[in-house]
Image (cartoon, grey):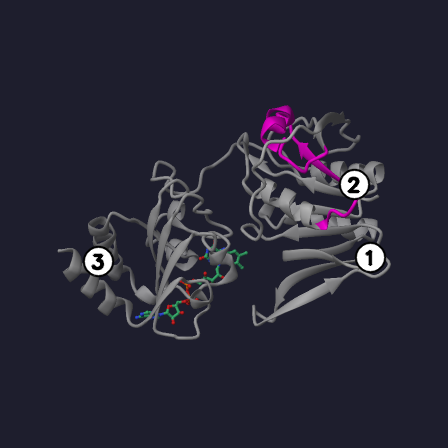
Amino acid sequence: MKTILVIAEHRRNELRPVSLELVTAAQNLRQGDDKVVVAVIGSQADNFVKNLSVAGVDEVVTVKAPTAEFDADLFEASVNALIDSKKPAAVLLAHSVDSLGYAATLATKGKFGFATDVFKVEYDGADLVATRAGYNQKVNVEVDFPGKDCVILALRAGSFKPAEEAGSPAVSSFDLPAGQSRTKNLEFVEQGGGNDVDITTVDFILSIGRGIAEENNVEQFRELAEMAGATLCCSRPIADAGWLPKSRQVGQSGKVVGSCKLYVAMGISGSIQHMAGMKHVPTIVGVNTDPNASIFTIAKYGIVGDIFEIEEELRNQLA
Ligand SMILES: Cc1cc2nc3c(=O)[nH]c(=O)nc-3n(C[C@H](O)[C@H](O)[C@H](O)COP(=O)(O)OP(=O)(O)OC[C@H]3O[C@@H](n4cnc5c(N)ncnc54)[C@H](O)[C@@H]3O)c2cc1C
């Protein structure tokens, strides 16, 4: 019997959706009497127990930390102590800014197996195999970890369906190991556009990417979105350039558009980082001049064409 340890992620007193995706990934690794243990670390750790009590979780462990915010030193020390105590075969974390702040150090110091940006995990006989993209997303790479009793895997958000069915796991607490944090949280600063629409709750999105070429062209797509009743969103280069607020950025370092039913991607290539925020959407329409653009690998409908011509045609149809 082995243990799979999941480290839940939260921010501003809200559980991040990826936490329940990690539970599903843990289920994929479960064999026979294996145990799935979910640990949550933070001053408000108890608040997350209810949301983490889903089917397939055997135990939720709360680790009371002095701060509600993420702290790399405290997380590293806590997860290391949990590994010592629970002896997990695998530790699943989100491939996120938080985890990447401590996971590599933890793995190196503990001589554990380690892989990041993993989107598939399974056992091949007794061997744990993690799949991640390589060579700029051109190939999928299967990684195994010969001789490693414990493997730390940072999983890509959006790769697993979140576990939803209610469960009734045992709940326990775990003492935060002694140790010093080297950071102090002064304040939480919301990224630009804090009062903007919450794109995680809308159901129809028209999203623009670098294909729009220049800032002057944003306005016509804003008008089109308004005419169609869609929320205008974007890929990261558009937000980085300040053409739309950061709150409209979809993707790994932007937002996951959890409620969206229809996503029209115009002039967006479909990088893994962008797809992390939208590939779950049931109806994706890709518009791109490049027939080999990655967006077409997940689009239900694809238009190989110029976004400006399509924009004009749609505008005529909607007028
Ligand atoms: C740690 C990290 C986090 C990241 N987080 C995010 C994130 O959250 N969200 C995100 O989006 N990116 C993110 N990125 C960036 C990501 O890797 C890509 O660089 C980015 O998604 C590319 O944006 P794009 O598709 O708009 O641009 P490009 O990749 O340049 O694609 C533009 C597309 O437009 C097409 N095109 C050009 N002109 C036209 C036209 N006239 N008509 C139709 N099609 C046209 C081109 O064929 C091309 O496919 C992140 C990167 C890193 C390293």
The disc labelled 2 sits on which kind of residue?
Answer: Asn
Is residue 73 left or right of 145 when viewed as pictured? left
State the SS at label 2.
helix
First in sequence, mark 3 or 2: give its number. 2
Q: Quadrant of residue 22?
A: top right
Question: Is the CB atom of the residue marked by disc 2 within 8 angstroms of ligand 1's nearest atom?
Answer: no
Which amino acid does the dot numbered 3 rest on?
Gln
> Rounded to the nearest whole Å, what is the CA distance between mark 3 and mark 2?
52 Å
Label 3 sits on residue: 220
Q: Which residue is mark 1?
A: 126
Q: Is residue 121 covered in magenta?
A: no
In which image quadrant can residue 3 be found?
A: top right
| Residue 148, placed above or below residue 92 | below
Packing grade of label 2 (10 A; few <14, some 14-19, many >=20) is some
Q: Residues within 10 Å of mark 3 (few under 14, many from 20)?
A: some
What kind of residue is marked 1?
Ala
- Magenta region: 29-58
User: Residue drawn at (80%, 37%), measured in percent from left and top?
Assistant: 81
Q: Residues within 10 Å of mark 1 (few under 14, many from 20)?
A: few
Q: Which residue in the protein does label 2 denote?
A: 80
